[in-house]
Amino acid sequence: MNIHLASPWLLLLALLLLPVLYFYTRHTNKIKFSHTDLLATLPRPAYLGLAKHTLFALRLLSMVLIIIAAARPQQISGQHKQRTSGLDLMLVIDTSGSMRALDFFDADGERQNRLAVVKEVLAAFIAARHNDRIGMIVFGDAAYTQAPLTTDYDVLQQFLAQVEIGMAGENTAIGDAIGVATNRLKDIEAQSKVAILLTDGENTAGRLTPLLAMQAAQSQHIKIYTVGIGGNDPVPVPHRGRVIYQHVPLDAKLLQKIATTTGGRYFQATDSDALQEIYRTIDTLEKTTKEQHVYHEYQELYAYLLWPALLLFLLEHLLALTRLRRLP
C-alpha cells in the first residue's frame, strides 16, 4: 500500500499543540491546598488519576486527527516513469490520375494499380505503430488533410480505406502537399516531426512551389522522407476501357533535393516488395525516445480521519456534561 500526504507541510500545525499541552500540565500539577498534609487525609480512588485527563486527551487526539486529515493522506496504486519510442508523422499520399498505373502487384501476385498497393503497404505500416501519432494528407490538384494526427490507429485505417484515385484531382501538387504537412506539424512540440511524401509524378499543379514548401518545412525542423513510385519505362495504364502503355514522368531530382535539404532520405520503389522495404527502413531510421509520466488512480483518505475526530470531539463534549468534568 503506497500512502503519502498531498500537503505534508500542514503537519506543522501540530506544533501549536505543544503550548496547549505545556500549559495543561502546568495547570493540573498546581497545588490547590494550603497544606500538603490535607492530601493524605482525602480518599482518592486509583482510577481518578487517569480519568481526570480523559477530556483533555479526547480533545487533543481529535485535534491531531484533524491536522493529519488536513494534510490529505492519499493511497496511490502506482506512479512511475516509462520511456517509450514515438514520433509525430504525416503520411502524404499522391492520389493523382497517374496512380492508376498497373505496374504493381499485391500480396497475392495480382496486378493492381499503384495506389491499391500503396494502401496495402501503409495499412501494414500503421498496424505496426504503438506510440506514434500519425496523420494523413492526400493530394492531387490540391492537398488536404484526410486525417489529423492521432494514435487511434483503427480510425486511421478507416480513413486510409476511403482514399481513392482522383479524390483530390488528377494532377500533382507536390508543393501544396508539403505546405499542408508543414502547417499540421509546425506548432507541435515533439522531438521528431516527420513527413513521408509518396508520389509517382512531378509537380504539375498547386499554388505553392515545391522549393518554397521545402524551405518552410526546413525552417520548422520537419524532416521529409520522399518515396518515388515507378521507373523510367512505360507502364500499363487503363484508358477508356482498355490498357495502354505510357510514360509517367517522375521528378526524382526534386524528391532527392527535398529529402536532402530537410534531413530525410529519398527512396525509389519500382515494385511492392521495394515499397514495403522502404517503409521498414524509415521505421528503423525514425525512433525517438521520450519519457512519459504514468499516474494511476489514487484515493483520498482524509474522511477516515475526520469521522473519528468528530466522534471523539462529540464524546468529549458528552462526557463534559457528566460528573467527569468535576473530577479533581
Image (spheres, grey):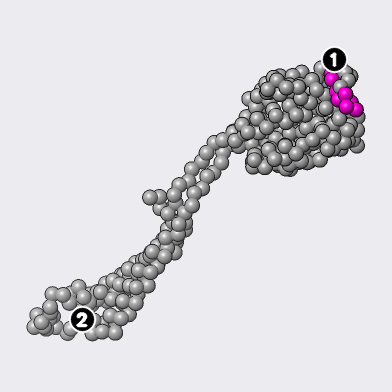
Q: Position of residue 113 (x, y in %)?
A: 79, 26
- Look at the picture and state if 282 lies above or below 46: above
Q: Which mark is residue 233?
A: 1
In the rendered image, is residue 129 in sight? yes
Real-space Cα separation, disc 1 to disc 2, in angstroms: 112 Å
Q: Residue at x 59, y 33 (%)?
A: 85
Total marks in image: 2
Q: Residue at the spot x=38%, y=64% of the render?
A: 304
Residue 49 in the image, given as x and y percentages of width and height: 18, 74
Q: Which mark is residue 328?
A: 2
- The amino acid type of the residue labelled 1 equals Asp
Q: Residues within 10 Å of mark 2 (few under 14, many from 20)?
A: few
Left-right relation of 286 to 323 = right
Residue 209 in view here: no
For marks 1 and 2, the one nearer the N-term is: 1
- Lateral position of residue 296 relative to residue 171, left or right: left
Mark 1, Cα crowd under 10 Å, few <14 / some 14-19 / many 20+, is: few
Residue 235 lies in the magenta-colored region: yes
User: Which three-letter amino acid code belongs to the residue tagged 2?
Assistant: Pro
| Helix, strand or loop for disc 1 | loop
The image quarter in which residue 156 lies: top right
Q: Position of residue 296 (x, y in %)?
A: 49, 49
| Numbered mark located on residue 14 in the image | none
Q: Is residue 76 above or below residue 196?
A: below
Q: Residue at x 42, y 58 (%)?
A: 73
The magenta stretch is 232-242
